[in-house]
Amino acid sequence: MPPHGTTTTTTTTMPHLRSLALVGLTASLLASSLVAAQSCANPKTHAEWRELTAAQQQAYVAAVACLKTRPSQLGQTSRFDDLVWIHSQANNVAHETAAFLPWHRLYLSLFDRTLETECNYAGPFPYWDWSFDAQAPERSEVWSRSAFGGNGRGSRSCVMDGPFAATRASRDCVHRRWSTEPGQFDLPMLGAFYAPETINFMMRYESYDPFRRSLESLPHNNVHMAIGGDMGNARLSPNDPIFMLHHRNIDRIWYRWQRRHPQQASMYSGNLRRGSSDNNARATDTLNMFGYLSTNPTVADVLSSTGGGAGGLVCFQYTNSIRPRGRVLTDDQARQVVSGVRRASAAYAAAADDTKDTNDNIDDSDTNDDSNDSSDRGSSGSPFNPKTPGPHDRTDMYNLRVSEPLSDDFLRRWNYSDTSIAQIRLEEQQMRLFVAFVNQVSGYVSKTCLGRVHSGLGENGGVAWQTKTDDEEQTEQMIMDMLVEGARQVAGFVRDTWPEIRDELVDGLASLGINVGGISVGGGSGGIGGHQS
């Protein structure tokens, strides 16, 4: 499990890609983004859950269960509940503010240190790269009985299998109530999450605040809403042990963004108060841990994950995550992708000239009839059927699904203002357009499509994944950057700041029947509601 940046990347992989202006990255920028910080002598390495051995997985789960038996130091039921309580107290300072990422980075570091000191955990701390499972999250290995158990059951949606079945934490059990196909209530299904391509789409932001807003509002909230139950409750979400793996992955995405934008890695800005448009956040602001620490660190103490800040608590790095098992992209396949991006860009430009609605290529029906069978599409869905499947479709093996919109009910329960909801609707629409664009690119098939992750298309069978090397990470990054640049340069719907997104998409949304007058945007009301709180 080599951490990102610890192996030497070659200069011979995909030479023809390095010269493409479409990529928009120079070799020097790539090299600088792969250089690990040197401020922390022996950083821990956080690994994807599936990179841990079975023994390591069992040890982690046992350590978390151990925290539920340790006495509280903050007047709660257990040491585990102390940490849940801290999160509940920080609800308004650690969500929808600039502090979202640094506060949770420190919080995770406290949780990890507590596992080590009070339950003798000595293994790697896992994250869940849900982008790998994005096309059918309910099939992920994290829901197995040997991991975190599955969906809740019964009228109270308590988890009844796995090591955390009916355990007592800050509530009488761990609650989960997965989002299901519209009109259904008991299906073991989760709507689609954000795929690696869409996460990379967010990486284009070159300053902290718009990146943080996008990451928190869309994929972060998407996973919370979809899992539901405790995870659907902003204050008590750490009651579900999957919370820590989810938020380590959110922190990993921030870590990747910092490495990709090294000049901005220590920059910090945005709103200090929730629901405010102020820009008063400063790196000297303190991160309140509500009595867990004798002294509250500042934001500056945690901006570098390898800086040893907060008295040595923050000293870690991440692996490159995993990828489906199979051959690495060949030069010929890469050239096909380049050609496909150009053709898709040209097609979008022509469609724009004809005032064609891009969303004709997005399927919101979630039907599962035989007409949607993709078994005969060959190696790419795009040349045969570029229609983007809905979040609950499970028949399309090759196209990326559009993620489920956040429901108005969820956003209001999480105290989002009308202005914030309007911004979220605009960026959700931008994501929909980008996914549709990716599916138009002939020759490109996502490594996380259902056909590769869950249907045994990997040559070796058995385990469907393997650890991603630095070379593979770099090549995938370059390919996905081409997709973003193709959308940016020709399709014309990619913008980099909230005002630009608002100004450029308002007319397009109006043409789709979405009212953006004033500060509210209709839509999303048909999403998933009813999560337990």
Image (cartoon, rainbow, N blue to C red):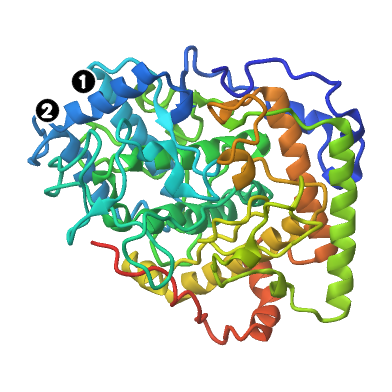
Among the two numbered marks 1 and 2 on one chain, the one whose residue lies closer to the N terminus: 2
Q: Residue at x 50, y 38 (%)?
A: 129
In this picture, is 193 found above or below 410?
Answer: above
Mark 2 crowdedness (10 Å alpha carbons): few <14, some 14-19, many ≥20: some
Residue 176 image offset from top left, x and y in percent: 28, 52
The front one of 403 and 418 is 403
Quadrant housing the C terminus: bottom left
Q: Amino acid at mark 1?
A: Cys
Mark 1 crowdedness (10 Å alpha carbons): few <14, some 14-19, many ≥20: some
Marks 1 & 2, CB-CB < 8 Å contact: yes
Residue 527 image offset from top left, x and y in percent: 43, 71
What number is the disc on residue 70?
Answer: 2
Left or right: residue 487 compared with residue 1: right
**Residue receiving disc 1:** 119
Q: Amino acid at mark 2?
A: Arg
The front one of 525 and 141 is 141
SS category of the residue bearing label 1: helix
What number is the disc on residue 1?
Answer: none
In this picture, is 355 found above or below 330?
Answer: below
Left or right: residue 464 compared with residue 146: right
Instruction: Return the residue found at the far top.
Output: 41
Q: Residue at x 66, y 15 (%)?
A: 7
The front one of 298 and 304 is 304
Residue 391 image offset from top left, x and y in percent: 53, 61
In this picture, is 62 found above or below 432?
Answer: above
Residue 139 image offset from top left, x and y in percent: 45, 44
